[in-house]
Amino acid sequence: MARFCAGFNGENQMLRQRVENLTIHHHHTLLHDLGQAMPRWRFEQLAKRSAADRRVRTLPCWRQFVALVFAQLAGIISLRELVAALASHANHAYHLGLGPIRRSTLAEANAKRPLTLHEAVFGKLLDRLQPRLAQSTRAALRLVDATTIRLSALSAWARVGVHHHAIKLHVAYDPKAAVPTFFAITPARVNDITVANAMPIVAGATYVFDKGYYDFGFWAALDAAGCRFVTRRKVNTPLAVIEDRPATGPAILADQLGALPARLARSRRNPYAKPIRLVTVARAEGPPLELLTNDLDAAAAVIAAATRRAGRSSCSSAGSSRTSRSSVSSAPASLRSSCRS
């Protein structure tokens, strides 16, 4: 009898193992995994600080945030499409704390809720990311650029002319990490250099930018912070050549050391009084590229490579700005008010 019971128990254990092996294991969705970077408790802490959920009854900020992240991941460009997609995944939405969402409620939330909460969320995510991007400041590269995003006629708050509506996105971009380290959204008529002067500077980094940031005061501020910069030369900028260096490296036509004018228009003193380097690079099409930099030690080929990298990144970001045009028309009220000023 004991032998029979032992054999019966052994068969039961084997059967139990087979049933467990056939059990379908639970797997988190990609949206759930991404949400771990910004846990709900931390998001609600930020929402409480900014009073974003005050007097909100049907759509808390957390549900609005998850819905917008889902729209970004899925490439959804309209609120109607977003609400339909969320309804089709209602079984997953429960675990994310979503619940049913109405299009009119989401549209009103996007239009009236303050932008400060999402700015705080971006700051927290960036703080988490920075330790993983630890690198020597000498190797840090920042690409500074701005792009105008055209909007539809429905965006009356962003009117530029009689028939044009647009805003401007200013970005400092880290190409190694493929993330922006700074961004600002302004009316389309705000000059690029105005935002750049208010941008935080990473000491010791290399900044690459175009002629929109051709300001000797901005260059002097970067140099004072121990940064290097590379930009294109304007044809009307005189340069007194101090030294001709050997043109070494592929496509390098000239490498010179010079000085900028000591005085500017209206007898103003030039804030950048140090020697500057002019590197001339041949291009497959068009005239040669003339680059100005305060880096007097790096190889000319390295300076040219940084400019080519900036060109590739600006081309890739242009496509992403086009995809965001249709989703900006329901921007928060704080953004619309800033664009009217």
Image (cartoon, rainbow, N blue to C red):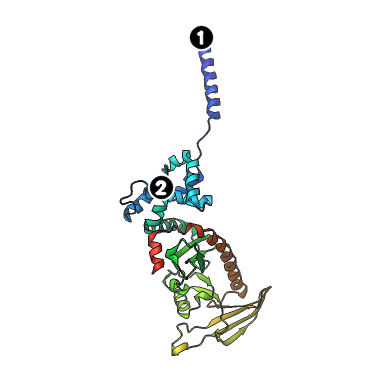
Residue 186 x %, y %: 44, 67
Which residue is most to the top?
Answer: 1
Instruction: Specify few, some or many for label 1: CA neighbours under 10 Å numbering under 14, 14-19, or 20 or more.
Output: few
Image vertical order of residue 153 relative to residue 279, above or below: above
- Dots 2, 1 in contact, CB < 8 A: no
Q: Secondary structure at mark 1?
A: loop
Which residue is most to the right?
Answer: 284
**For residue 235, side relative to residue 226 (left or right):** right
Label 1: which residue? Answer: 1
Q: Residue at x 51, y 39 (%)?
A: 27
In 3D space, how far apart are the residues under numbered discs 2 and 1 (Cα atoms)?
Answer: 62 Å
Residue 283 x %, y %: 66, 74
Viewer-side residue, 214 vs 223? 214
Residue 18 x %, y %: 56, 25
Res. 226 in view: no
Q: What's the amino acid at mark 2?
A: Arg
Image vertical order of residue 43 relative to residue 143, above or below: above
Residue 211 x %, y %: 53, 76
Q: What's the amino acid at mark 1?
A: Met
Disc 2 versus disc 1: nearer the observer: 2
Q: Give the total number of marks visible in the rendering.
A: 2
Image vertical order of residue 172 relative to residue 75, above or below: below
Q: Tell me the tag on residue 63.
A: 2
Q: Tell me the tag on residue 248.
A: none
Res. 229 in view: yes
Q: Residue at x 38, y 64 (%)?
A: 337
Which residue is most to the bottom?
Answer: 267
Q: Secondary structure at mark 2?
A: helix
Image quarter of the C terminus: bottom left
Quadrant location of residue 335? bottom left
Image vertical order of residue 5 relative to residue 105, above or below: above
Q: Residue at x 66, y 76 (%)?
A: 286
